[in-house]
Amino acid sequence: MTTQQQMNTLNDKAASKLNDLIQYNIDSAKGFREAADAIANEKGAPLKNLFLDIANRRESYVVELKQAANLKSSKKPEDDGSAKGAIHRWWLDARSKLNGGDPTVVLIEAERGEDAIKERYEEVLKETTGSPVNDLLLRQYSGVKAGHDRIRDLRDQWKKK
């Protein structure tokens, strides 16, 4: 069975879960782009590059999830992030401005966002076990978890500086 044929067997519940992940990934990509902009000093240049890399990866996840959701769902996949994500990005912006673009503050907020997307993938993976999109979701979750762990480790390193 081809991937497209497998995706055609998605039920509406699984397609709805994919739409949730699309929204989370949109929020994540926007958040990482804003986090990259919030880094104020030159020492933070490697962080900017990491944030932009993660944003690009999350945008590629959106494309993959939209393709999977479009194949079955009667509901149009999300194109915008959530209100909750917008509030989190506003909070990141406010905190980073108040702290002069301190990378530690930006990393703390970035990790909070990473906690949210990682937890959502874990929930969706439990709910879609055995579905044809599981391989896609597991691969993306692996990337999300790696991003989360990298951000957490960097946050801890910056705290020590």
Image (tube, helix red, strand yellow):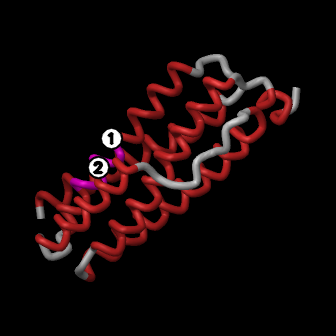
Q: Residue furthest bottom?
A: 42
- Determine which quarter of the picture holds residue 19: top right
Residue 126 left/right relative to 114 = right
Residue 154 left/right relative to 5 = left
**CA gap, disc 1 and disc 2:** 6 Å
Q: Is residue 49 magenta?
A: no
Q: Are marks 1 and 2 in contact (CB under 8 Å)?
A: yes
Where is mark 1, residue-wise?
A: 115
* Mark sitting on residue 59: none
Question: Residue placed at 27% from the left, 50% from the top?
Answer: 153
Q: Is residue 149 above or below residue 134?
A: below
* Mark sitting on residue 111: 2
> The magenta stretch spans which residues?
108-115
Residue 82 left/right relative to 133 = left
Q: Residue furthest top?
A: 130
Mark 2 crowdedness (10 Å alpha carbons): few <14, some 14-19, many ≥20: many
Residue 115, given in percent of the width and then of the height, sits at: 33, 41
Q: Is residue 66 above or below residue 118?
A: below
Residue 53, given in percent of the width and then of the height, sits at: 49, 64
